[in-house]
Image: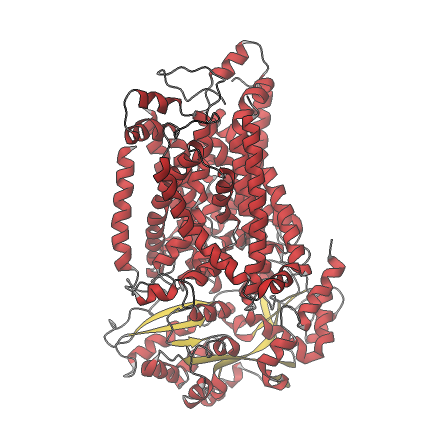
Amino acid sequence: MKPKILLSTLVIAALAVAGCGGASDSSDGGSSASSGGGGGSKGSLSLVAYSTPEVVYDEIIPDFQKTDAGKGISFKTSYGASGDQSRAVLAGQKADVVALSLAPDVDKLTPDKLVPEDWVKQTEAAGGKGGFVTTSLVSFVVRKGNPKGIKGWDDLLKPGVKVVTPNPFTSGAAKWNLMGAYQHGGIDYVKKLLSGHVPVQPKSGREALQTFTGGEGDVLISYEYEYATAVKKGEKDIELVQPDDTFLIQNPIAATTAGGAKAQAFVKFALGDAAQQHFADWGYRPVNAKILAKNKSKFPDPATVKTIDDYGGWSKVNDELFDPEKGSVAKIEDDNGVSTAK
Amino acid sequence: MSTQAATPAAPAPAARPRNRRPRASARAGGVGGLGMGLAMLWLSVIVLLPLAALAAKSLDGGLSAFWDSVSSRQAVSALKFTLIVSVIVAAVNAVAGLAIAWTLVRDEFPGRKVVNAVIDLPFAMPTIVVGITLLALWGPTSPVGVNLAFTQLSVALALLFVTLPFGVRAVQPVLMELDRDMEQAAASLGASPLTTFRRIILPNLIPAILSGAALSFARAVGEFGSVILISGNKPFDTQVSSVFIFKQIESDNSRGAAAVAVVLLGVSLLMLIALRFIEYWGARHDH
Amino acid sequence: MTTSSVSRYGIRVFALGYLALLLLVPIGVVLYRTFEPGVGAVWDSITTPAAVSAFWLTIEITAIAVPLNTIFGIVAALALVRSRVRGKRFLEALIDLPFAISPVVIGLALFLLYGRQGWLGPTFTNAGIQIIFSVPGMVLATIFVCLPFVVREVVPVLREIGDEQEQAASTLGASRWQTFLRVTLPAIRWGVAYGVVLSVARAIGEFGAVSVVSGKISGETITLPLLVENRFSNFDLAGAYAASALMAVIALAVLLAMTLLQRKGDAR
């Protein structure tokens, strides 16, 4: 037994020493070319983003590092659920650029001045209208061949049709889906949908897709880019159906107060032609008008596309619909419980 | 209490109560005040301090806000469901864990070492992989045609999977250390295997079994990642407290989340104390 | 004790049947899915820079958290079983609590304590020490979730063996430390061993709490479970399975090591 204890103590000691030094060094390379880079002679830039555009930033960052503005800047990247990332930055995670899934997650960072209050204007000045770097549409994903013949929102209410959509309370980004439903038929439609046709609400968009491909449901409410990325990454047996009326998803980007000039340079680059083309390649709608026009064939426009501004902005919508205690969607969830309660 | 672990050195009268008779000084082989103090310090820094921060947060808005958060219908429903399913899981683990540990320690069969090795794997499997696998096996595309997905049973299934190691590993080391002398004595006196088991072996295993059950219960109450995919998190149906708390956090209601977490912890603590008392009483009663 | 053949087979069938249904089949499925794309693909998947970095980080965190926790576990177990202290039941229950706390709550609690606006956060930041969103925070979270293991495995064994031998040793003049090393430790070795094995498995596999406090910085604070989740989010299921197979290998290796060490101790 003695040697064992001795060994463990040595191990602890050794690793404690290693751990103190090793934690902050960025070791050999990250998940891709995105971290490391040019030896960090001009410092490093921390990008905190939501999870899906990781594949895109993996391409954008090396391009940026080839430009004058980006030469010598090493990157530290962090990807995760948008709400979680926002909370992490609030709790002190270092961030020079935040690229999240919906604007409120960035707005949360302004009271403590982690992100400048006029971030929207700053991003717009860099080329991102409204403070956004990409947009997308709420769409349907169905099984290959569309066996249930889903074309629009009303088809979701057909008897026997089962819909999968993430829970709006576990995933801020999942609220986009319900806004798509809301713009079609108001709270009544949402109630009918949630009460009669949604058997389960997975905790995130990705898990919802997994549940769907795992055999549950006939229709998945999702985002255009989620579908495109999935297909590009090898998902088969699924098809995209774009309803005629839907909701515009808008993803913000902002340089934080701590970010400084190099953060602003990166934001500018992300809104420039090269980066926006990368986004388009992965299914995100560019905000860069030139690149959007160039890729128009990939991004058909449905007849009606509503935005959050049509409903008074996120704070109003969050209060009315998504407040966990008083919002209408919370009430629907509660009422549903009455009929299924044991 | 059975006899000591086997060494020839110090024979002792079998039924003398150990550790129960109060003594003026610390027991032989104990760690004394310093050891106790260090252990308490560690416990405080690692566990109690974060919990204190949590409790403080939960009371941020005062008692009435605390009460509102924990008395909502969804919160109560999730709590009830969580506690009931966790108790069931603990009970099943107690039985199954004993049987499995018995088989691993006392039985010989080909592949025993392999089976012993994989017992701990549920711990080492990332929860998302557990979720996907359970969904694949017991969900809509199940190869055996069993679709339990999104039912309350699916929650139990996921929890049984992730708490399996507790039931087994709690009993296993004690079984290994069990002294066979008394069993052989009983057998030579004509006791049937069942009687021997019931009167001699089982009482010595009760503390370990209850320990395993307590740990299973605790883990089941807090389990999150492996349950969510297959259970569907339906409020008032298959939603467990940990998912409900998660929803509060994601909705930026960390105060409400902390409140429900504190209540869940309080109830768990009570159950764990109760289990410990039963264990204590059961072992004591032996004399 | 010689069980009758019937009951031995009965127990065996029940135990193995339960195990097969609940455990072996799912693990078999995971194995199958992992190696479906072929061993070469799996190897490539676990030798990417990200996977290698995640592997070493997981090992590092485990190697710090588990020994510390083992020491605590043994000390606490001895204190619980052999000291005259009031409120032992309460203490034992407290020690079990970390399991009952869902990982997101652990993350929240650690935020509240070490975060930018937390109780201790500013103190550490001013001292230049990064706790949260760095390895120390991840170690704290891991220790938190592993805390009960060794204690719980050792306590029943300690109760089972009593303190007779220690008494004998001290009457023979052994010092406390000698008694501990020569008498107590060998007696509880299987309890400690399984406690360590379980802690290691849990430390390797812990996702939720570590995820919240890690900051998920690519190449720096991504452990194997976080890598699995990252790959899952990026539609790389095969990669996710490969990384989790790596985790299983580590857990099995530790079990093997502990078993071998115990067998050596057995042969005395």
Residue B210 lies, with reference to residue A326, above or below; the image says above
Image check: A248 left or right of A116?
A: right
Image check: B202 left or right of C178?
A: right
The image position of residue C164, as x and y in percent, is 39, 22
Front position in the image: B274 or A16: B274
The image position of residue B217, as x and y in percent, is 56, 43
Q: In which quadrant of the rendered view does residue B263 lie?
A: bottom right
Residue C141 lies, with reference to residue A40, above or below; the image says above
Q: Residue at x 52, y 47 (%)?
A: C29
Q: In which quadrant of the rendered view does residue C170 lie?
A: top left
Front position in the image: A325 or B129: A325
Q: Quadrant of the N terminus of chain A?
A: top left
Front position in the image: B118 or B80: B80
Residue A317 lies, with reference to residue C251, above or below; the image says below
The image position of residue C223, as x and y in percent, is 39, 56
Q: Residue at x 42, y 84 (%)?
A: A271
Taking the view exactly as shown, the residue that stands out farthest to the top is B189
Front position in the image: C117 or A220: C117
Is residue C184 visible in the rendered image? The answer is yes
Tag count: 0
